[in-house]
Amino acid sequence: MKLLKYMYDDRFLFDYFFNSLSVAGLDGTLKKRMIGTQGEGNIHAKTGTLNSVSSLCGYAVDNDSEILIFYIVMNGFGGKTTQMKNVQDNFAITLAEFSRK
């Protein structure tokens, strides 16, 4: 979270960093995730999986075009990542659907 916040606060580096992340439904490790949802195109994140640990962290652009920072790490699920990725996706989609209005 500190790194994500640090990069967000750096007006010279943020655009480069933000655009280097995978985009849900469009490219990288998120190409096949969140398609047809509010998350598609609005979640810019990094994924990670290792020894029963799965993570998703990055930025969600919400309905008000605000950028929300998130970090999800899940462990102890016995190697099956599909269910964990679905939970992560639902969380990220909820952030993308958020509006203060």
Image: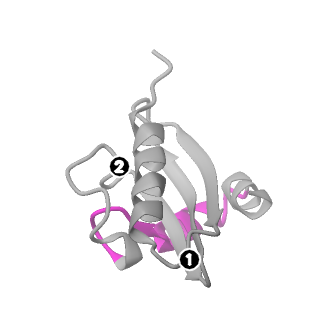
**At x 20% / y 50%, what residue is drawn?**
36
**Residue lying furthest bottom:** 51
User: Magenta stretch?
Assistant: 10-27
Of the image marks 1 and 2, the number of the one nearer the N terminus: 2
Describe the element under mark 1 as helix, strand or loop: strand
**Residue lying furthest top:** 101
**Which of these two is toward me, 76 or 66?**
76
Circle 2: is it few (<14), some (14-19), or many (20+) Cα within 10 Å? many
User: The disc labelled 2 sits on which kind of residue?
Assistant: Gly
**In the displayed structure, would residue 57 be above or below residue 65?**
below
User: The disc labelled 1 sits on which kind of residue?
Assistant: Gly
**At x 35% / y 62%, what residue is drawn?**
24
- Quarter of the rendering containing residue 51: bottom right
**At x 64% / y 56%, what residue is drawn?**
71
In the picture, measured across the screen, residue 27 lies left or right of residue 44, that is left
- Image location (x, y in percent) of residue 45: 51, 64
Location of mark 2 (residue): 39
How much space separates mark 1 and mark 2, taking CA atoms?
A: 18 Å
**Which of these two is toward me, 17 or 11?**
17
**Which of these two is toward me, 69 or 82?**
82
Quadrant including the N terminus: bottom right
**In the displayed structure, would residue 5 be above or below residue 27?**
above
- Image location (x, y in percent) of residue 5: 73, 54
- Image location (x, y in percent) of residue 69: 62, 49
| Count of picture labels | 2
Quadrant including the C terminus: top left
Location of mark 1 (residue): 48
- Quarter of the rendering containing residue 75: bottom right
Describe the element under mark 2 as helix, strand or loop: loop
